[in-house]
Amino acid sequence: MANFSLVTEFILLGFPELQRQKTAFFTILLLMYLISVTGHCLIIVVVFMETKLHTPMYFFLINFSMAEICSTTTEVPKLLANILSEKSTICFACCMAQGLMVFAMGAVVFIILTVMSFDRYVAICKPLQYKTIMTNELCLCLMLLAWVGGFVIIFSQSSVVWTYPYCGDNIIDHFFCDVGPVLKLACADTTLIELIGLIYGATIMWGSFGLSLISYTFIIATIIRIPSATGRSKAFFTCASHLTIVTMFYLGLMFMYLRPATHGDPHVNKVVSLVRTSFIPMLNPFIYTIRNKDFKIAAWKAVRRKVFL
């Protein structure tokens, strides 16, 4: 260590192979980011304005939208700035804070998705007991668990990553401060923290994904018994679209993080991360809310009320 100086900033390599197409890449990425943020903000505003949408489902969707906005805003604006700049640097503290926020929001989203699937299970499979089960107190406790639990779980690991010495090479082969590329630069043995991260990741991801699949299995079984063919197809289409997005989200993260953090092809990881960061958040508002009939009616009411005022 005496022969090395500690790193005070990192260089985010990003996508150097797209340098010649950086204008098109920047435009597409910016468009997806704006659509994502606008869609999630629309959900939050409309639900707050329309009292008929003050239900557990939309309460969970508001929290989901806030987590998605925080996650994408932590990554995408910095990536957009780096595309246009000649040297893409990020300070040490900023890098660690970015990693903490990205993974904390990921953990929050895992828990919220599980809660949302349980909420839909109760609404579809036990409609007569829905109000007695999904009380305001339970909904509030579940969301507090999601936000506090997500940050506590990730902070306990991130604080260890902060303490490692980083010397010599400071180039991160990614577009954000992902834990794997960062740990590769540490001048210490990172085997233990990688093992702990792997155990945490497997527990959270598989636990959340497994519980969501159980809920959707019961939902599909109930939908099959719907006597009306039109109602059955409509409900099945909605459930299938939700399950598709959930599966894409989980499988992408499992592919990247359910193995030692410093392993894996960095180019493949960057592409999968970009899909998770930009493409899926852009689809989520449309899949979960905006194409919902009740939400569209409430949105039009809110627009007419605003115009009238």
Image (cartoon, rainbow, N blue to C red):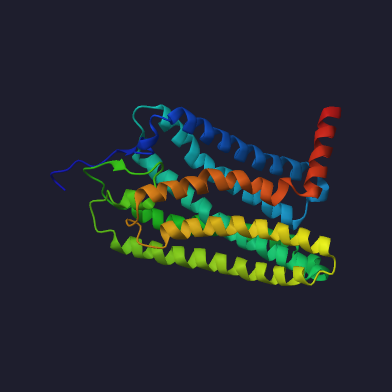
Relative vertical location of residue 261 with respect to residue 215 in this rendering, above or below: above
Instruction: Determine if residue 241 is in view.
Output: yes
Q: Position of residue 132 (x, y in %)?
A: 79, 68
In the picture, which quadrant includes the C terminus? top right
Residue 120 found in image quarter:
bottom right
Residue 257 found in image quarter:
bottom left
The number of discs equals 0
Residue in the picture at 85% in, 65% down: 228
Relative vertical location of residue 71 with respect to residue 206 in this rendering, above or below: above
Q: Position of residue 68 (x, y in %)?
A: 58, 47
Q: Is residue 146 toward the left or the right of residue 231 in the image?
A: left
Q: Position of residue 126 (x, y in %)?
A: 78, 71
Q: Position of residue 59 (x, y in %)?
A: 71, 53
Q: Is residue 174 toward the left or the right of residue 101 in the image?
A: left
Instruction: Determine if residue 148 is in view.
Output: no
Residue in the picture at 66% in, 67% down: 216
Q: Nearer the viewer, residue 284 or 135?
A: 284
Residue in the picture at 39% in, 61% down: 197
Relative vertical location of residue 21 with respect to residue 165 in this rendering, above or below: above
Q: Is residue 31 toward the left or the right of residue 223 in the image?
A: left
